[in-house]
Structure formats: C-alpha cells, structure tokens
Image (cartoon, helix red, strand yellow):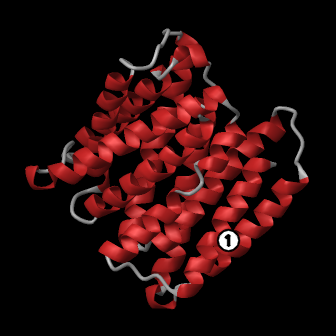
Amino acid sequence: MVLALGIYFSIAIGVGDFFGAYLARRVHSFTAVITFLGIGGLTALLMMIAVESQFAAGNAGLGAAGGLTVGFALVLLYHGMAVSSAAVVSPVTAVITALIPVGWDIGTGGSLAGWVIVGIAIALAGLAVTTFSPELGDRALAGVGWGLASGTCFGISLTLIGQTDIDSGLWATVFQRFAAFAVLGALAVVRRIPWFVPTALLRPGLIGGVLTGSGVAAFVAGSQRGTLSEITVTASMSPAVTVVLAAVFEKHPFRWWQGIGLATVVGGVILIGLG
C-alpha cells in the first residue's frame, strides 16, 4: 500500500509541477499556486468520501501548520523552474525536501545511519552534475537558490503532515491546502495579484490542482500506514517526471550528463529514506 501511494505521489506531483511551471511562465507564480491550492483543497475534500476520517484538532493543526510553508514552497519551485530550468531546480528541491525529515528524526532523538551519510554524499554528487548547465549561465546558479529555498519549505511541510494519525484520514491534507490558499490569497489581495488563472489556462490549472492535491493526500495516507522514511523513498521519483516532461514538451535544456546526475540524485534520496 505504501509503495503504491508513494508511486502515485511521484507521478502526480511530477506532472503537477510541470503544469505549475508552465503556468508560472504565463501568469504570476502566486496566481498559479493559489489556483492549484484551491482546486487541490476541493479535491482532498471529495477524496474524504472514500477515506474514513475522524476530525482531531491536533492533526488538523499539523496540516494547517504545514500549509504555512507549502504555499511558499510551490511559489518558489514554479518560479524557479520558469526562470531557470526544471533540470536544475527540481533535483535540488528533492534533496533538501528529503533531508529535512532526516534532520527532524535526529533532532528528536534518532541517530544518523550510515546509509544516510552515503545517500547525502551521492545526492550531492548528483546535484553537482545535474546543475552544471553552461547554456543557462547565471540562471543555473539562480535555479540552485530557488531549489534550496523551495526544498526547505517543502521539507518542513511534509515533516509536519507526516506526523498525523491514521484515524484522522485526510483532514491534514484539507487543512494544508486551504491554509496555504488563505495565506497566499491574502498576500495576493495586498499585492493586487489575481487569484485564479484566466479561462484560457483553466485546463492546466484544473489538472495541476487535482494532481497536486491528490498527490499530497497520497503522501499523508502513506505516512500514516508506514513510516516517513518509507513514503519518502517511494515518493522520490517526482523530479525525474517533471524534468522529462519539461525536456520533451517545453524544450528545457537537458544534456546527457544531467540525466546521469538526476538518476544519481534519485538514488541518493532513496538511500537517505532507507537510512
């Protein structure tokens, strides 16, 4: 079950992030993310029909707390991929996202397993290869920065929602999506940024919103039925999905050495999770 949920997360988030970057090149990144969050929250509510859930304030609070960072994580990720390259930003985000839960485990009394050290070294080596993109110039370094910031926010959010109880079902997903929606929506009002994408871009907005919302729901369900490490391992393939789609459909620069680097990053993330 955890394996299936993790695989779905990778595919759904990978495809959803591709659509997010697509929208961020055409509208403000806040607009793209707020659209995704609103649709994702409604998707999670509909999914609760099929998943038994008992409301608990503590679990809902974990979801809402995760929402305070996940909205900014998405804005940073989509903007970074729009101005740099998915091949640079997405792998960096994935590595940092995986390291945050490990840091949490260590900080709460866990130990740093040998596989984690090996995984970190492998992932960093892969990043050095993946982020080498001469044709991007300064945009490659900027992409690394966006990825670091996005991964930090994602790691905090996923660590929080990964602590929920199985009895609470998908309430954490609902509160995460709508809390992020409220925070970014308020900022958008202040900055006079549109909340939703125009009608011409509604289809990718709907697809991306449903996929990212259901993907996070799968992550929550997987963490409740297994461990945070298990779901992290099986959910580590999303950057590969995003990068391949960006290279094929958006003609993002993607060289053979970046393919090797991306595979190395994914392998390192898996070892971090196994540790």
* Residue 177 location, quadrant: top left
Where residue 102 appears, as percent x and y from the top left, is 75, 45
Q: Which residue is mark 1?
A: 264
* Residue at 54% from the left image edge and 37% from the top image edge: 219
Q: Nearer the viewer, residue 139 or 271?
A: 271
Where residue 259 appears, as percent x and y from the top left, is 56, 78
Asked whether residue 31 is in view, the answer is yes
Mark 1, Cα crowd under 10 Å, few <14 / some 14-19 / many 20+, is many
**139 left or right of 26?**
right
- Tell me: residue 226, above or below residue 112: above
Q: Nearer the viewer, residue 212 or 176?
A: 212
> Which quarter of the rendered picture does the N terminus lie within?
top right
* Residue at 36% from the left image edge and 44% from the top image edge: 211
* Residue at 50% from the left image edge and 78% from the top image edge: 140
Where residue 119 appears, as percent x and y from the top left, is 78, 61
* Residue at 50% from the left image edge and 9% from the top image edge: 54
**31 left or right of 159?**
left
Please give the count of numbered marks on the rendered protein: 1
Where residue 148 appears, as percent x and y from the top left, is 58, 60
Q: Nearer the viewer, residue 109 or 69?
A: 109
- Tell me: residue 171, above or below residue 206: above
Secondary element type, mark 1: helix
Asked whether residue 146 is in view, the answer is no
The single residue placed furthest to the left in the displayed view is 199
Query: Which amino acid lies under the numbered mark 1 shown in the image of this protein?
Result: Thr
